[in-house]
Image: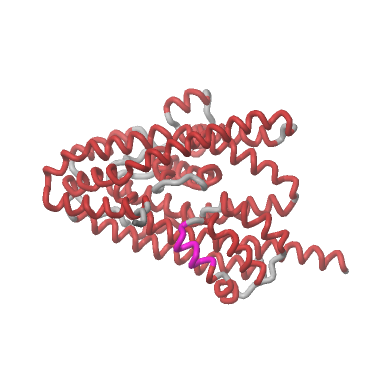
Amino acid sequence: MKKISGSTQIMIAMVAGIVAGFFLGERGVIFAPLGDVFILLIKMVIIPLIFFSIISGAAALGETKSAGKVGLFTIFYYMGTSSVSVVLGLLAGSIFKPGMGVKIPESLMADAAAYAENAEIAGFWETIMGVIPENPFASLVSGNILQILFFALFFGIALSVMPKERQRPVLDVLDTVNQGMIWMIQKILVVAPIGVFGLMVNSIALFGMDIMQLVLKLLAVFSGTLALIHFGMIPMLASVLGRMNPLRFLGGMRETQILAFASASSMATLPVNKQECEELGVRPEVTSFVLPLGATINMNGNAMLYALTAVFFAQMFGIELGMPQYVAIVLTSVLGAIGTAGVPGPALLVVAVLVAAKIPLAGLPLIFGVDRLFDMMRTSTNVLGDASCAVIVNRMIEGELEAEAE
């Protein structure tokens, strides 16, 4: 008998939770501890995971300076497109307001008010200085995600400029710790269906069936914004910077997009992505460098979803987002992808984004339950973004060769 995949189990648990919540009504809160334990387990690992993963990712990125201009352009291109995707997610959430329309119980509103009090509005320089940790260890203890990101990124870059023999022992330790963290996450995900069931029953008990309308609205806004990135921004960049017809580009990447949608894995799609890019005329030496790097750090679809989700939950709880929260969302979404791209799990980085922006976690089951569908869609966009970078870098190299020939 074929084993049911983890994502399928989570979907089944979500549906079972909705049905149970419908029949149990307010009595469904008795299942709340199942979801609470699951959330605590995730929160337990997210801070050390972010810390150690970002150091390793930044150290690896620092080594790409040997690739010269191409390496720097590739990194800035991926970071730039992910940042634009985050902004589009924030704009879509602000314009269409997918989180509006549900009456929140007073007990949860009290929690939201506490979060809002801790998210006081600060000026530009206060926001910048708030990212720099006075004591990195205190930041780790308090769970200040932005300060953890800043220190880990800085430390990772410092490691990358050291001699190989000096940095290797530290990187070996970091790799070992990361593997241990991933093992812990995999074990936590074993109980994810139980946790999602408890969270979903409790959500229906607290909010009623109206909550499901929000999920559909979030899905609609996400799909529309992702389509803008997938069929608009990425092909336009390939056309303007890479001098490739956008229809030819999209048509040439057809199999890659389909496989990415079906597998929800950028890494699994890498061989087909490489083949189709080379069929479009991209040099093998370009695809060999740009595409693996993109599969690791380029998360256009993810970054947009994290931003949209943050706005979605803030609207649910009536929290007014200010500049510090927007900065937190952008930095956590973009930089977090460097180290956590290969980490399994249902939108785990959403937890870090919400914590960084001081937004309550009470609505997480809505995301966990449908994350597989979101994941399939955003992965297809991620790999298309990887391919667009390969096309643009290939054009850069051809331009330099043409200049040298003259």
Q: Is residue 99 visible?
A: yes
Residue at position x 29%, y 53% in the image: 99
Residue 289 in the figure: left or right of residue 25:
right
Percent x, y of residue 301: 47, 57
Residue 43 is one of the magenta-drawn residues = no
* Quarter occupied by the C terminus: bottom right
Q: Over which residues does the magenta segment extend? A: 256-264
Percent x, y of residue 306: 42, 50
Q: Is residue 126 visible?
A: no
Residue at position x 29%, y 60% in the image: 216
Percent x, y of residue 221: 36, 61
Percent x, y of residue 36: 27, 36
* Quarter occupied by the N terminus: bottom left
Residue at position x 42%, y 27% in the image: 142
Give above or below for 284 relative to 357. Answer: below
Give above or below for 290 relative to 181. Answer: below
Magenta span: predominant SS is helix
Residue at position x 22%, y 52% in the image: 16
Residue 360 in which image quadrant: top left
Residue extending furthest toward the right:
406
Residue 270 in which image quadrant: bottom right
